[in-house]
Image (cartoon, rainbow, N blue to C red):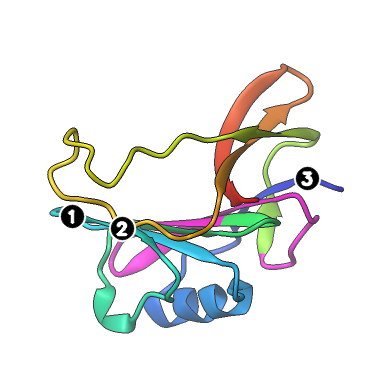
Amino acid sequence: MNPFVGVSKQSLSVPQLLELIEQFGNESTVYFFRWYHQVSGFHKQLPKKNDFPMIEGQMFDREFELRWKYKSNGLYEVLLLSRAGEHSDFELVGNDWEIQDRNAYLYGSTETRFPNRFTFVDRNIAQRYFIDKQTATVRFIALTVT
């Protein structure tokens, strides 16, 4: 296991981002999208071109979490948190990472703290901490499936 944290070498347009999302997606991938007015909840489907512009999104499975965030002019910045090693489209962030997998608690579908009910998938969702070995600081918390 070789943990990797990286950012996209360049900002991506929607077609480039969708191509990257398709490249990483598989049958166990879970997606979550955010707009200014709503969140999607957890889904098993890829985002569609007409879902953009979304302000943020993420996808994850056992090996990685990929996050994207709207920057400006229709471009997105992308972050990759992976336990499976480097990826050529991403620039390394930090030098030495340690990961720890932990349980995660999801609120029930009837939780009233959210304005709308979330949709959930039938997978167990956990957390993966990415810890900077030099400072022993948790820098990122990724979602993962168990």
The residue where tag 3 is placed is 3
Mark 2 sits on what residue?
A: 119
Q: Does any portion of residue 70 appear in the rendered image?
A: no
Percent across and percent down for residue 86 are: 78, 58
- Find out whether residue 35 is within the magenta segment: no
Compute the Cα span from label 2 to label 3: 30 Å
Q: Would you say 109 lies left or right of 143 here?
A: left
Q: Nearer the viewer, residue 121 or 78?
A: 121
The residue at the point 72 percent across, 17 percent down is 136
Left or right: 63, with 84 as reference point = left
Q: Amino acid at mark 2?
A: Thr
Q: Which mark is nearer the camera, 2 or 3?
A: 2
Picture disc at residue 38: 1
Which residue range is magenta in the image?
66-89
- Dot 3: element: loop
Viewer-nearest of discs 1 and 3 = 1
